[in-house]
């Protein structure tokens, strides 16, 4: 049985508030009346009721100064270098933005208030692609990243697990309504379809896309129930990229003739991409109290 949730400690720190997820998370928290401090690195973010701070989280001194000044009661750590190709091509810079940044935050929080909830968003890219015959990963499966991005996120996860209230939420591909600066893959897909441009989608890359609001419900539930450990967050259906395109076309009235099929196995990306990293989210859904949306339901709610 799940114990009653508690209030989130105040203020709440959201790292990466200028990113896609951070932007939506800040909107939710401020709308719910929380006192929120949000950080950005290069893209200033201005929002009603948000205290916005510029910082390079890979700088230990700056991070210490910020945390000591605001003394957060809860931390949602979403900031990272999220471009998988950039991470592969510039591993040292990626390590700073992912591993060093996380260590800097955790080291200071450990000294300041180790009982504050610290929730880091990680990724399905820590898996190498589903083993034969197994449809979805769950929390008991071993992570064996293929790419530099996945390897660095996995390393950062271990740092977070040192905190008594450190939790890692491994998210699937995130989509949702537009954000201020950064967009999800949906903006690219729908933008191209709207302009009547053909889109090329893999038929052999499988994901469990999650609506950003469902992911946020999951992050908030983990913090409110003061949980640590590992949580997986994916949507209710397992889909190829091509299937996502087909659902979008059928639901929004675009012609399927704009969709061009290709194969991940024939592609030439700078970073290796696992073919099937579908996630089983039943543990997190139980904490939230409902199943996460299917892609079709998610699109309908955005439409
Ligand atoms: N998007 C997905 O589909 C997806 C899927 C699974 C997991 N995730 C994880 O979810 C989290 C959020 O993803 P997202 O797509 O919302 O990210 P995003 O839009 O790319 O935003 C990344 C954020 O990190 C900040 N940042 C980067 N380097 C920094 C540094 N050195 N110091 C301080 N801040 C820095 C950026 O700041 P500026 O923009 O101001 O420079 C931005 O606010 C990430 O941890 C990602 O690994 C994402």
Image: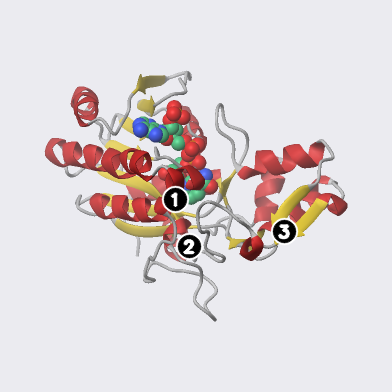
> In the image, 214: left or right of 76?
right
Residue 194 x, y percent position in the rendering: 80, 37
Above-or-below relation of 247 to 22: below
Q: Are marks 1 and 2 in contact (CB under 8 Å)?
A: yes
CA gap between label 3 and label 2 equals 22 Å
In which quadrant of this rendering is ligand 1 seen?
A: top left
Task: Give the quarter of the image for residue 117.
Answer: top left
> In the image, 286: left or right of 246?
left
CA gap between label 3 and label 1 equals 27 Å
| Badge 3: residue crowd in 10 Å (few <14, some 14–19, many ≥20) | many
Residue 139 x, y percent position in the rendering: 38, 67
Is the residue indicated by label 1 positioned so its CB lies within 8 Å of ligand 1? no
Is the residue indicated by label 3 positioned so its CB lies within 8 Å of ligand 1? no
* Residue assigned mark 3: 242
* Residue assigned mark 1: 218
Of the two numbered discs 3 and 1 in the rendering, the one whose residue sits closer to the viewer: 3
Q: Which label's residue is closer to the chain start, 3 or 2? A: 3
Residue 51 x, y percent position in the rendering: 37, 20
**Dividing the image into 4 quarters, which one contains the C terminus?**
top right
Residue appearing at x 85%, y 46% in the figure: 253
**Front one among 64 and 38:** 64
| Badge 1: residue crowd in 10 Å (few <14, some 14–19, many ≥20) | many
Q: Which label's residue is closer to the chain start, 1 or 2? A: 1
* Residue assigned mark 2: 281
Label 3, secondary structure: give it. helix
Residue appearing at x 24%, y 29% in the figure: 63
Residue appearing at x 63%, y 61% in the figure: 264
Residue 226 x, y percent position in the rendering: 28, 50
**Front one among 113 and 108:** 108
Label 1, secondary structure: give it. helix
Label 2, secondary structure: give it. loop
Q: Which label's residue is closer to the chain start, 3 or 1? A: 1
């Amino acid at each position: 049985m799940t114990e009653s949730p508690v209030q989130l400690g105040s203020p709440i720190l959201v790292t990466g508030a200028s990113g896609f997820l951070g932007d939506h998370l800040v909107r939710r928290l401020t709308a719910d009346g929380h006192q929120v401090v949000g950080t950005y690195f290069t893209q200033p973010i201005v929002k009603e009721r948000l205290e916005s701070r510029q910082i390079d989280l890979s700088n230990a001194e700056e991070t210490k100064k910020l945390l000591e000044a605001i003394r957060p009661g809860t931390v949602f750590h979403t900031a990272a270098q999220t471009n998988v190709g950039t991470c592969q091509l510039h591993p040292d810079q990626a390590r700073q933005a992912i591993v060093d940044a996380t260590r800097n935050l955790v080291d200071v929080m450990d000294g300041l208030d180790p009982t504050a909830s610290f929730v880091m968003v990680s990724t399905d890219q820590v898996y190498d692609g589903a083993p034969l015959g197994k449809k979805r990963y769950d929390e008991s499966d071993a992570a064996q990243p293929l790419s530099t991005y996945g390897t660095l996120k996995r390393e950062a996860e271990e740092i977070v697990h040192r905190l008594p209230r450190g939790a890692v939420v491994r998210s699937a591909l995130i989509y949702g309504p537009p954000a201020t600066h950064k967009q999800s893959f949906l903006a690219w897909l729908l933008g191209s379809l709207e302009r009547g441009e053909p889109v090329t989608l893999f038929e052999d890359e499988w994901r469990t896309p999650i609506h950003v609001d469902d992911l946020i419900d999951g992050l908030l539930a983990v913090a409110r129930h003061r949980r640590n450990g590992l949580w997986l967050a994916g949507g209710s259906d397992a889909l190829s990229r091509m299937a996502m395109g087909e659902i979008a076309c059928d639901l929004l009235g675009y012609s399927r003739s704009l969709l061009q099929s290709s194969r991940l196995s024939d592609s030439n990306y700078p970073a290796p991409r696992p073919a099937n990293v579908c996630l089983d989210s039943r543990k997190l859904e139980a904490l939230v109290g409902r199943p996460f949306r299917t892609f079709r339901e998610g699109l309908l709610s955005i439409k």
